[in-house]
Amino acid sequence: MLRFIVRRLLQAIPTLLILSLLVFVWLRLLPGGPAGALLGDKATPEKIEALNKVLGLDQPLVIQYFKFLGRILTGDFGSSLISGEPVMTEIGRALPATIELSMAALLFAVVLGIPLGYLAASYRGRFLDNATVIGTLVGVAVPVFFLGILLKKVFAQDLALFPPSGRQDVTIDPTHVTNFAVLDGILTQEWDASADALWHLVLPAIALGTIPLAVIVRITRASVLDVLNEDFVRTANAKGLQATIVRRRHVLRNAMLPVSTTIGLQTGLLLGGAVLTERVFVWGGLGSLLAQGIERRDYPRLQALLLLAAVVYVLVNLLVDISYAIIDPRVRTS
Amino acid sequence: MALLEVRDLRVVFQRRGTEPFSAVDGVSFDVNPGQTVGLVGESGCGKSVTSLAIMGLLPARGNKVTGSVKFEGTDLLTLSNREMRDRRGRDLGMVFQDPLSSLNPVIPIGLQVTEVLERHRDMPRKKAMVEAAELLDKVGIPDPTRRLSEYPHQLSGGMRQRALIAIALACRPRLLIADEPTTALDVTIQAQILALLKELVQDTGTALIMITHDLGVVAGLCDEVNVLYGGRVVERAERHQLFAEPRHPYTHGLLASIPRLDAARGEKLVPIKGSVADNIPWDSACAFAPRCPNALDVCRQVTPALEDEDRRSLRCHNPVLPGTPAAQEVPA
């Protein structure tokens, strides 16, 4: 198992190298440049050229790329062209908010999605199943930002059940430890801070988690239906095993294989949705950094963010592969 | 008293928007304790559905089962799901056709054996593991203790079927149903598995229902044989009698279509013409009539009844005369 993990980690290195090149080239293909964006109305060709020289953007792209590569290997992603702060400091500050939101959304999707998918499969063709299938179709189709605005309007403004924006109420003065608001509250035993953070999480998590939820429900349903038809489920029933054991040990375990892949893919996609959700709920995570960075062509910040996304994606896929190997012995031995 | 009395068993499949289809159409037979009974017929004759109906393993919806299946006097068809779960694996065991797909690919063999021991014999896991190794040993799996932690894909086809037999017999059921247990195996392994089954049922006194399309299997194993056609028993006889003197044209055709080593050179195999698709409903005819070399006008007008004669039951208007050698029958 350890060899399997090490091998998969080594395989991730060329993937990340190629991605770094793509990110670098793609950003420089965008029209306009940081100098023009920084200077705004006052931009003249001479001023832009001078600023490019200061920023090192006048050098050939190949040299820029290898310099960039050399720096990131030492963990230096440069400083933001907007704030002047080191990019890693900016990201470090915003990342916990995004991770917290993503985890909450994923938790919502998985904890609700797998049982719902299983239930739909068990009641195949009946009302519950049909309702689920239609519901998930709607769930997949609704854009994240639209659902976010809708939730905010109904549950935050009209019904006033949940806070409309932010991560914590301004009246709360929490102690920051990890910058994960819920976790900090638990660590410092400031329970009201944790509860308030959770309260703020509900709507954004639902907005962000709805698409993954719908996808997970559909995949679980299809996968369970497949497995229910398998001969070994008939064998398990022929043994007279209790229905719960047949379900858990024989059906669910096999049905989880495609579901774990789906969860991985959806986790990767969450980042994109998080940007939009954060915008709607004024969350202050990576989303605002990214949006601002794109507007102002902040190369260092964008490079770091895109590479971060790539690393997350690769890691999530590694986790999926590991979970596969845990569930399925045939993967382990081959 | 018979161990199992199947009376007028009917299984009708009914899906929305389709005509109801009788897969099993009034099947009756007995199995005595320790007896081996064969259910023989080609694909689609209802033999597997009969076994699944006895086990209560048909899908919960889309079918209707009527008649009675009395096991030691209790009608299994009247039991609740829960009561049936208590009996399956304990009183009734079953071995299926494809040993690879019949074992759970992601669970070690050991657990697949012990779970049935834990369920019906209240054994703790540790004790069950010891017992499981003994069971695997008994069905001829070498190095059983190591095998317990292996997965189905690490075993050969024959080993897998042995493991399934061990699972089915783990709680010493009084009835074992084997549904084409050798069909998916290599020919060389088939004989081993049959010999194993024969030995085990003899040793333990387990009654066996052997479901097969292979008359060779029947010849080596069964005390009594039920030949099924179109969801009904068309001929029932003791094994020697059936092979020596098949009376129903279908049975006769089945025997005639077996290649024989002692046949004269150049002698052709005689297939039964047509296929199950040619069946006509039993309602007012013999379902086999369109394929039958002996068919008379009456066969297409009147449903033949299953009539008992001297130690044989036969459903035919115009049976093959005693003494007709199987190979002489040449259909058009």
Image (cartoon, grey):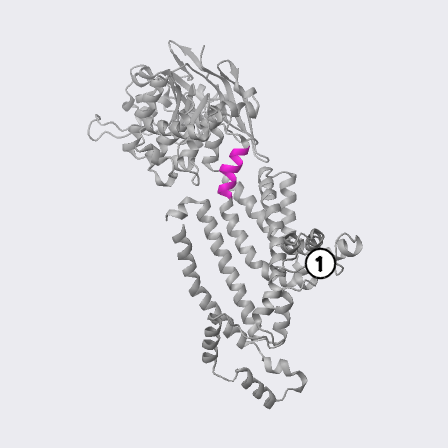
Check disc 1 and give the amino acid type: Gln
Instruction: Give whichever of B122, A327 is nearer the camera.
Output: B122
- Above or below, A212 against B236 in this view is below
Instruction: Give whichever of B279, B216 is nearer the camera.
Output: B216
Tell me which chain the residue with mark 1 is part of: A
Q: Extreme left residue here?
A: B265
Answer whether residue B280 is visible to the viewer in this image. no
- Above or below, A86 against A45 in this view is above
Q: Position of residue A125 (x, y in %)?
A: 61, 39
Task: Tell me the quarter of the picture where residue B3 sits.
Answer: top left
Task: Tell me the quarter of the picture where residue A152 sits.
Answer: bottom right
Q: Extreme right residue here?
A: A158
Q: Where is residue A156 in the image (x, y as percent from the top left)?
A: 76, 55
Count the numbered circles shown. Answer: 1
Which stretch appears magenta? A244-255
Q: In this view, does B268 lie to the left or right of A128?
A: left
Residue where numbered disc 1 is placed: A168
- Above or below, B308 against B128 in this view is above
